[in-house]
Amino acid sequence: MKKLIYTNENRLKLQIGYNEDWAKDVNLAIEELKKVCEELTDEQIRKFLSSPSSLCDELVEAARKEYNAYMNNVPKSVRLSTAFSDGGISDAVKAIHKALMAKKTHQIIDKTTIKDGVCLLDKDGLEALKAECSVYGGEQAEKVWKLSVKAAKALNELQSAIEGNNAFADAVECWGRWQGFITINDDKTEHYKPNPNILNTLPGEKE
């Protein structure tokens, strides 16, 4: 995962909130899944989220192998009278997945996946988020962050001149907020500062 510079703070907050809610729903679904399948590997969990039918096939195949191994040691009459059954595991897995997908109603721009138990953006989600960013990538992000620090410092030094021209001040605020470079104190003292969200690290990124 890479660092992003995001120019729409409100949308970013909505996206983070969505990701957190979705992560909770995913974790609850996995708990339900473990009641049906007992122990699951990370790969099986990823398969459940991306291709539940593939996981069902895998689980049914494992159940069939256990059935065959057991039946090899019983009388032929028992084998003939006891047909294989997956115990409804396939239907149960699909039902859990369907219930999970039904909760996914407030997606904004990303698609999430599970990696080591953490919700992350997948490739499509990253591409969508890149389209919403003015700058994408670690090195560029650092440069823009440094620029925002310089911009805030310069604007504070020019404060008296800015106060003498309201039109200019409005233009500066509009430009700065849209770019995501600077913020203005809530106490209306017109003190400019770097935007703390300009370097946002997505959930799951390892520095």
Image: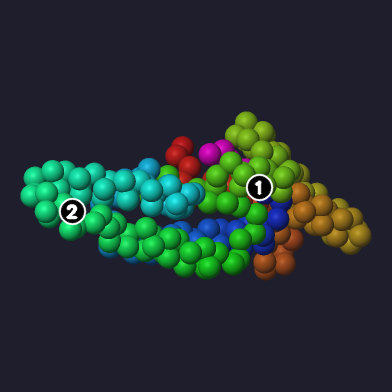
Residue 144 screen position, x and y as percent: 69, 38
Q: Is residue 200 left or right of residue 69?
A: right
Give, as a three-letter code, the residue at label 2. Answer: Leu
Report the magenta residues as a range: 1-5
Mark 1 to mark 2 CA distance (whole Å): 57 Å
**Can residue 152 be seen?**
no
Tell me what residue is drawn at x 89 percent, y 62 percent: 166
Indicate which disc residue 166 carries.
Answer: none
Indicate which disc residue 129 carries.
Answer: 1
Indicate which disc residue 80 carries.
Answer: 2
Q: Nearer the viewer, residue 36 or 158?
A: 36
Q: Is residue 6 left or right of residue 49?
A: right
Dominant secondary structure, magenta: loop
Query: Vertical placement of 141 versus 71: above or below?
Result: above
Which image quadrant is residue 28 in? bottom left
Asked which secondary structure carries label 2, the reply is helix
Residue 191 screen position, x and y as percent: 71, 57
Q: Nearer the viewer, residue 163 or 180?
A: 180
Tell me what residue is drawn at x 26 percent, y 50 percent: 63
Give, as a three-letter code, the residue at label 1. Answer: Leu
